Image: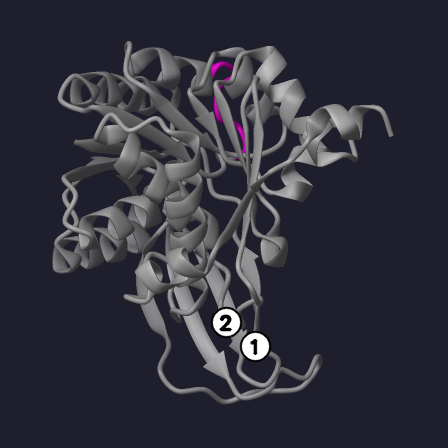
Amino acid sequence: MILTVTPNPAVDMTWEIDRIVPGDSHRAETGAVRAGGKGLNVARVAHAQGVDVLAVTTAGGATGAELRAELETSGVPHHLLPVAAATRRSIAWVDRSLGDTTIVNERGISPTTAEWAEFVGAVHEQAALASVVVISGSFPPGAPEGLLEALIAASGERPVIVDTSGPLLLAAADAGASVLKPNRAELSDATGLSDPLDGARELLRRGAGLVMLSLGEEGMLAVTRDAVLSARLSAPLAGNPTGAGDAAVSAVATLVAEGITDTETILRRATAWSAAAVLMPLAGDISPRHPELAEDLTVSAIDTEKKDTE
């Protein structure tokens, strides 16, 4: 089983608009509303692929009731802890003319110290039944220091995949996360290093086992202490990239849950599922074209020794 942990869930609201004009008013068809937050997206993708999952997160206020209702309708297995603070919202405007998406994420409100303790306890309890644990997304402002490390520790000896940003990315590496999945900007912001390979190596030096680095239209890198592999499509895809990173994490988790550790196999599925997510209107879904996209990938090794001497 894959256990996903979402410390800062959201009610995702998505509208498709013919063309967004700054400062203008717009009309759209009724938008889509679903339970979101990166870990829930990871669980939704894996569940749709027939993989056993359980999503652990919080729910509070009227928006939390919406999140709970949508999860129950979706059929994604979940364990929700009630909290006093209202669940945040995330709003996405999809511009059909440009093929891009504008997103506004509320920062979220931190649960109480007692609620966080219950949350960590729930993760510890459910992790005993899991083969891999995924901790994904932001933490709300005011979350206690050391919370991420506590969640990783609560996972026990199981592989832990972490997708987060900022100082938390460094904390996950220091805590020995099995896999980290930053994008280029997140890696640079966290490490202060402009070169992606240097940034990935810093995470490995701190204790991470594998870094899956999203490069947008340039594909993805898989960086270990011994090798660097690159995967990219023959041509970039237009669509909604909102859930692409979450789909990549889900791909990694499904393979790790099966005991598959081959780096190229992981990279191929992660890149293909990430691309397949771009073709879908909502985060948490991937196109059935993902096997075709996997076949279209070019995977190659990067000669790091040559790069180091340049």
Question: Which numbered tag is attached to residue 239?
Answer: 2
Residue drawn 14% across and 44% down?
77
Q: Residue most toward the right?
A: 310
Secondary structure at badge 1 equals: loop
Residue 66 placement: quadrant: bottom left
In the rendered image of this protein, does residue 21 appear above or below residue 1? below
Q: How is the image coloured?
A: one colour
Residue drawn 45% across and 14% down?
149
Q: Quadrant of the C terminus?
A: top right
In the rendered image of this protein, does residue 276 appear above or below residue 121? below
Left or right: where 217 falls relative to 8:
right
Residue drawn 38% across and 54% down?
273
The span picked out in magenta is 141-146
Secondary structure at badge 2 equals: loop
Mark yes or no: residue 237 visible: yes
Residue 289 placement: quadrant: bottom left
Residue nearest the observer in this picture, 178 or 221:
221
Mark yes or no: residue 37 visible: no
Point out residue 187 in the picture as x, y percentages from the top left corner. Answer: 65, 34
Point out residue 93 in the picture as x, y percentages from the top left corner. Answer: 52, 72
First in sequence: mark 1 vs mark 2: 1
Residue nearest the observer in this picture, 202 or 186:
202
Residue nearest the observer in this picture, 296 or 73:
296
Residue highlighted by disc 1: 99
Left or right: where 192 falls relative to 211:
right
Q: Specify the amino acid type for callout 1.
A: Gly
Mark 1 vs 2: CB contact within 8 A? yes
**Label 1: how many Cα within 10 Å (few below 14, some 14–19, many 20+):** some
Q: Specify the amino acid type for callout 2.
A: Gly
Left or right: where 259 falls relative to 214:
left
